[in-house]
Image: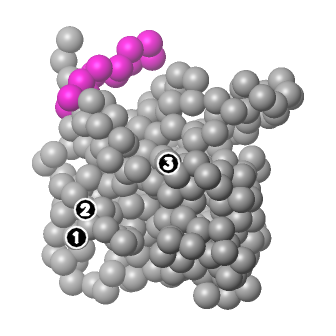
Amino acid sequence: MNSSTYLIAYFDILGYTDIVSNKTTEDEINLVKGMKEIVNSINDLNNNHFQISVHTFSDNYVIAIEISNNNDSEKVHKAMFMINSLQRIQHQIILDHGLLIRGALTKGDLYIDSNFIHGKALIKAHNLEKEAIYPRIIIDNELIGEIEAFRHISSTSPEDFFLDMLENQKYIDNTETEPRYMYELIPFIQCFDDVFFINYLIGNSKTQDKFNAKHADVIIKGLYKHYGNKRVSEKYIWLCNYHNMQCSDGAYIDTSNIKELYQDAEL
């Protein structure tokens, strides 16, 4: 049984247990259908350029793409495809179900087929997911370093580099004049700590305003719902600060009332 090098994303849906335990069967079915549609749409975007492996168990998801360690261009293009696919998943699960995701993206040795997945990369991704702490998908520093090294070789600005990545991956809708997920900013950031994570609060202006408003609503409801539960509320406080750092427009969250509840929180 031989392994190969893969990009691997491991993530879970926060709040899934609540849906299964406390909500209707219809809510659960709608969530499963929604996730299947999102995964299928990623394969549609890929358009058979390379093989994508998806494994799921309950609320745990693994997405893997084989890469070559001897081809930096291919590796970085596939990494950017994975990052933008994960952004798409985060967008849709929040828009359609008001749920959040926590996970990690890394690379390493993996054996994978239609029934089985095993290897150091899976363990690494699982451990990194625990380090994410907050509702975000963190990116392995080694992978960040390889993307940045390749960008510097290309001698372009960060913005032009990432836009070129999207252009080269043919993210084009027949009905649009710009890439489907053309981001104006770098698609990963550090925020309040030294951990890089996928920045999903940037995107196509045609849908971003609606998404930002929904994201704000999810945060506000979560802060009130989980008041008194420090472990959970701390995650929503972090998310609120991330949201307001990225959204300076009409979706900015007014924290004046929230501060009355969370008097010791840095909001």
Q: Amino acid at mark 3?
A: Arg
Q: Secondary structure at mark 3?
A: helix
Please state which of residues 152 and 70 is positioned toward the viewer in this rendering: 152
Amino acid type shown at disc 1 = Glu
Secondary structure beneath dot 1 equals helix
Judging by the rendered image, the residue that carries numbered circle 2 is: 144
**Residue in view at x 64 percent, y 34 percent:** 16
Residue 124 vertical placement versus 238 (above, below): above
Residue 114 in the magenta stretch? The answer is yes
Q: Residue at x 32, y 63 (%)?
A: 196
Q: Quadrant of residue 253?
A: bottom right
- Disc 3 to disc 2, C-alpha distance: 29 Å
Marks 3 and 2, the one that precedes in the sequence: 2
Give the quadrant of residue 205.
bottom right
Disc 3 + disc 2, Cβ < 8 Å: no
Query: Label 3 belongs to which residue?
Result: 231
Q: Residue at x 43, y 69 (%)?
A: 187
Mark 2 and mark 1 residues within 8 Å of each other at the beta carbon: yes
184 relative to 23, above or below = below
**Amino acid residing under circle 2:** Ile
Q: Which residues are magenta?
A: 109-120
Place of residue 30 in the rendered image (x, y in percent of width and height, measured from the top left): 80, 34
* Quadrant in which the N terminus is drawn: top left
Q: Earlier in the sequence, mark 1 or mark 3?
A: 1
| Count of marks placed on residues | 3
Q: Residues within 10 Å of mark 1 (few under 14, many from 20)?
A: some
Please state the horizontal and vertical placement of residue 129, each as a whole percent of the image: 37, 42
Residue 157 spot, x, y in % from top left: 31, 86
Q: Is residue 162 left or right of residue 202?
A: left
Q: Which mark is residue 148?
A: 1
